[in-house]
Amino acid sequence: MRSPIVPIIGFLTGIIILAGYFVPSPVLEAIRTPMLDWAVILSGVAGLIAIFHLVFGVHGRRLRDPEKSHVFSFIVILVFMLTVAAGIFFGINHTGFQKVVTAIQMPMETSLMAVLAVTLAYSSLRLLQRQRNWMGFVFFIAVVLYLLVNSGIFALVTDITALRGLVAGISQAPLAGARGILIGVALGSLLTGIRILIGSDRPYNS
Amino acid sequence: MAEINCPICNRLNKDEAERCWYCQAVLHPEKKNADGSSDWLDGFRQENTETPFEESNEASAGSDESPEDVPDWLARIRQREQLEHGGEPEQNPDGEKDTLDWLRSAVGNESPTESNTFKPAEVNEPAPTESDNDADWLGKLQSWQEESSEPNKSPAPEHPFEQEPKPSFSGPSNQEPDWLNEFKSEAAQSEPLPPEKQPDDSSTGDKPSPENISAFEQEPKAPIAEEPIIEDSIPPTDAIGFSIPEGNVVKPSSPEPDWLTDFQSLDETKDLADQVMPKPAVEEPVKAPFSGRDIMDWIDKDRSTPEEKPENAVEQVEVPQGTDEGIEPAKLPSWLQALRPDKSKRGIAGSTTSSDLNQKSPLAGIEGVLQDSVIGQFYTRPQTYANTLKITPEQENHLQRLQNIAGEARWEAQESVESKRQSSILLKAVVSLLLIGVIVFTVLTQKNSLVEPTMYSQPVVETFNIISALDPAKPVLIAAEFDSGLYGELKWSSESLLQQLMARNIPIAYLSTTQAGSTLFQATITDLARKNQDYSLADHTLNLGYLTGGTVGLQALANDPRGTLPLTTLMKPAWTDTPLQNTEKISDFSAVIVITENADTARYWIEQVKPSMGKTPLLVVISAQSAPMLQPYYDSGQVNGYIAGESGGTAFEKMAGVEGSSTSHFSAYQSTLILLVVLIFVGGMISLVLSTPSPERSDKNQS
């Protein structure tokens, strides 16, 4: 049986933070601010623990396992150690250390995004081949239309009042869908918060 | 006082007693023989004439018939007996008739409803005196039977045959009637007359039944088995089943009655039944001891074919083991044959019934009994198959052809898959080359965009107005919430905005909730500072580093910026001797600008920080893919303005009057988008016209 102390602490903390959000009380502010600072510190410590677990826990165990490949784990651990050493030695504001991010990490991730763009373009060619239904046609038309809108090519027809209004309306059309998504997200967040407050969900106690 | 043992029960009795005090047997049979042999039958004869059974049953009315009415078979017996005994005249012609009479009356007095009601004799009954006639016990027997039958004068059951108890054939010998003992003594020839004793309920009053017969047959040592004539000589209504152990038989010493001696003259080689009881001229079934309404239906069915049953029944009569094998099996009475199950029916139910099962098995006579041989007809052994497959040469040829066809089909399928894969790779390469070619061409040729953006969106205009109106004394907080993958788009989109801030010497403090965000932004702002020499990074910028905790960190930042981020990335105090020294709260910033590609990150800032900002504007530079999600917050006033993607950056540059990266790359961006639209449209039309979707996929899509 789980201890009831943890849910009680979670409930009281949530209530205090929530009350301080709506009630501008100095007392609540005095209680709420240290709690949030503790949470930030604990989050940073949790990040460090996760990093060390990934490097020395997962990949270190793979290095000790004779049945698994050691190459990639060795590279991960080696690069991690070099980066940490460079950051400690040069500092994170050093230009040379920033090259680790700007010359290595950013091109790699950007290249992946470029491959994704080409793949999406190729998939769009075969859109109607695989999704030959009314939803497929709607999606096909929407893709074509909004690519044209974002390209700015409709600036050619700005002199035509009717078309200007039509283009403006098309540009605002995604707003309806976005609002629906955001309302759903808000309701889900509210329900999740209530469940945590009343102790129905205990993510802190799992 | 002298005592003698009872010859029957071997118990001690007084010497002067005529009969055994326990079993009422005659203790001095020699005295009785001296008095005359057949007087005792007279009394019994008189009693029998008064039985109601004789009045109602014509078949058993032998006592009333005259000597002229003697049946032929009996006459033949008498004749043969006379011949064998040297033509001695019958000493007591009436004796035979009377003997049969009492036998009939002994059974005939029992109505079907009173058959099994004999009670044991009273043990405290006074012993008869010596002066009493020997036949008085028979009279007592008859009177006792009448008395004992009174309590059972209940209404006759519908099927009395079923309710009658099975007789016991294992009773002591002193419970048997005298006439039977006399009959047994015939073989001994030198034994005295049987003692008088009262019949026991276990040996009298039983109706004939198959159980009786079978029990009778299963008594191998019974003396009666040596004389199967007795079984047939007894009328059907007198079929009383009992046996007499040999040790307890009291053999009479007086000469037997004439009617019994007649049986000795029977020819054993002939059918005893025919000799003793010849068939009547008219073959009408002998009346069963039960009324017609009392017989069960299955008996009626069997009686419907009387001509078949006697032969079948004779075959099923079992000769007792250990008896004289030369004696032929007796013929069962017709009424008993009628009780036996039909052989033909048994053949239908059980196919074949072995003789052992019929005669020895406890299930003898039961219909529908399955036997091993019958079971074998319904169940066969499982068929076994060989492990090897035997095929003919023709089948082998067909198999070879089938393998060739399958091989060709598989080769065609592999070729088709390979062809599709190659065409797919080719198409991807073509698309990639087209996109890259268009981008490179537009960049290298420095061509302007095909269509200049003339329609500036309202958020971009609001953003430009807010940036233009910022107080240069107050710092601007910039949140670099982006990853490396989309850094290129956001860099170009935000570059003109940053240039605008630098142009106005507005201090900039920046942080990030992602690990690489602050570093990338520092690199960006360092590049822009080179273009604007008047803007000193050391004096006007402050790197607050990485903010952990996600939404919690943002909430803490909104409540207490100084406590949440007290140090810079250089490990110096962030809030003293810096552009932030006059900043206590988040609302003290001139503006908060969030640069992100993720709509959720923008939402976190809107939800957690915006309420603490007061009148401080919140501006967002966001990727084009997330712009629609930000539009509702702009409409609600939670976001004061935003720049969405390459188009927004270009529009901002146009409004600011600068030529930035966004404008220079907008032509490539626009050309690529138009190319994509063309490719997608053409490809969609080709797919729509040429390709045919598979039925499975189409059904799956419809569902």
Image (cartoon, grey):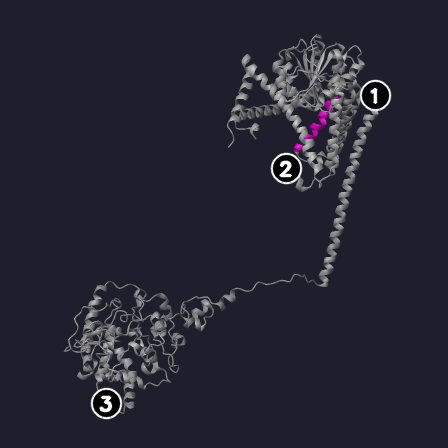
Instruction: Say which of B571 and B527 sits in front.
Output: B571
Going from N to C along the chain, the mark reached first, 2 or 3, is 3
Is B520 on the left-hand or right-hand side of B98? right
Going from N to C along the chain, the mark reached first, 3 or 1, is 3
Q: x and y percent of residue B179 in the render?
A: 25, 78
Q: x and y percent of residue B338 in the render?
A: 36, 71
**Quarter holding residue B20:** bottom left
Q: Which chain is mark 1 on?
A: B
Secondary structure under tag 1 reads loop
Going from N to C along the chain, the mark reached first, 1 or 2, is 1
Q: Are marks 1 and 2 in contact (CB under 8 Å)?
A: no
The answer to whether residue B548 is magenta is no
Is B124 on the left-hand or right-hand side of A6? left
Q: x and y percent of residue A193 in the render?
A: 56, 24
Residue at the outermost left position: B131
From mark 3 to mark 1, how far is it between C-alphas? Answer: 164 Å
Give the amino acid at mark 3. Answer: Pro
The answer to whether residue A139 is magenta is yes
Give the amino acid at mark 1. Answer: Lys
From mark 2 to mark 3, how far is it between C-alphas? Answer: 120 Å
Vertical relation: B524 (above or below) B328: above
**Quarter holding residue B231:** bottom left
Vertical relation: B67 (above or below) B495: below
Numbered mark located on residue B702 in the image = 2
The residue under the point 56% across, 16% down is A31
Q: Which chain is mark 3 on?
A: B
Where does label 1 land, which residue? B447
Badge 3 crowding class, 10 Å Cα cut-off, few under 14, some 14 to 19, many 20 or more, is few
Vertical relation: B255 (above or below) B388: below
Secondary structure under tag 2 reads helix
Where does label 3 land, which residue? B89
